[in-house]
Image (spheres, grey):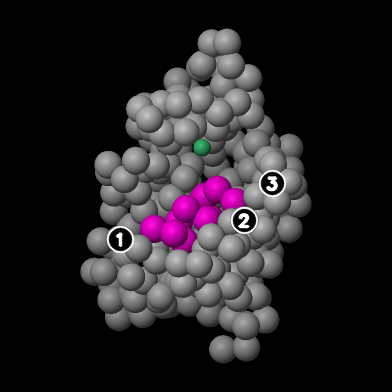
Amino acid sequence: MVSKAKTALIMVDVQNDFCLGGSLAVPDGDAIVPLANQLQPHFSLVIATQDWHPSDHMSFAINQPGHAVGDVIMVDNVEQVLWPAHCIQQTKGAEFHPLLETSRVDKIVYKGSDRMIDSYSAFFDNEHLRSTGLADYLQEHGVEEIYIMGLATDYCVKYSCLDAAKLKLKTHVIIDACRGIDLKPGDMDKAIAEMRAVGVEIVEMKDVLIH
Ligand SMILES: [Zn+2]
């Protein structure tokens, strides 16, 4: 067990539904799986997140009569993008990609399990009402610096980075180990700019692997 780790790798949502053949496949999402495996030995603490929805989750277009995938609706005064049903608890789609190395994973963080609210960030739901426990876990393990990679750049990776920066964690995003959705063209570039604006450092695989 790692107890004195200072730097952690956070692998965001490397799950079947976000990869090739999944219900919400991120373009080229599978490409990051070998990169995740390559990164893991460089960190003393490895954390993986899983989007983990009940089948009646409010973010699924099928659960919002009259709406279609891609619509943006207001729920409790918060904008909500409607997605295809994805990452339903205990289903194949919610499992990690079969080639993702999981023997080094120290902690799995589940998010989005409350049907009434979405949770892009690894730290909090989208209204910041409830913590996933990740912040406490990092603090308990003395982690002040994190590296984030995974899916998707312009949603769960971005919001995880923004929350991490708010929590005063020294945050890096390994940008070539992420893939985005670009629902609206330019979303990915905007996400990178937003992350940079709050002090997140944009790095690449080669910057991490030389250490
Ligand atoms: Zn989701």
Name the amino acid, label 3: Asp
User: Which numbered marker is on residue 135?
Assistant: 1
- Of label 1 and label 3, which has the lower sequence position? 1
For the residue labelled by badge 2, is the local secondary structure a helix, a strand or a loop?
A: helix
Residue 182 numbered tag:
3
User: Going 65% across and 36% down the picture, which residue do you hit?
Assistant: 24
Q: Is residue 7 above or below residue 11?
A: below
Observer-side mark, 1 or 2, equals 2
Q: Which residue does the image show at 28% across and 72% down from the upper left? A: 141
Camera-nearest residue between 65 and 109: 65
Sequence-wise first label, 3 or 2 = 3
Q: At 51% from the left edge and 25% from the top edge, which residue is drawn? A: 73
Asked where in the image residue 6 lies, by quadrant, the reply is bottom left
Locate the N terminus and report the quarter of the image it occupies: bottom left
For marks 1 and 3, give the CA distance.
28 Å
The 10 Å Cα crowd at callout 1, few under 14, some 14 to 19, many 20 or more, is some
Disc number placed over residue 190 in the picture, else none: 2
Tell me the residue at 36%/71% (across/down).
Answer: 169
Residue 7 falls in image quadrant:
bottom left
Q: Secondary structure at mark 3?
A: loop
Q: How many marks?
A: 3
Q: Which portion, as a residue range, is magenta?
A: 153-163
The local crowd at label 2, few if under 14, some if 14 to 19, many if 20 or more residues have their Cα within 10 Å, is: some
Eyeballing the image, is 163 above or below 112?
Answer: below
User: Magenta span: helix, strand or loop, mainly?
Assistant: helix
Q: Nearer the viewer, residue 8 or 176?
A: 176
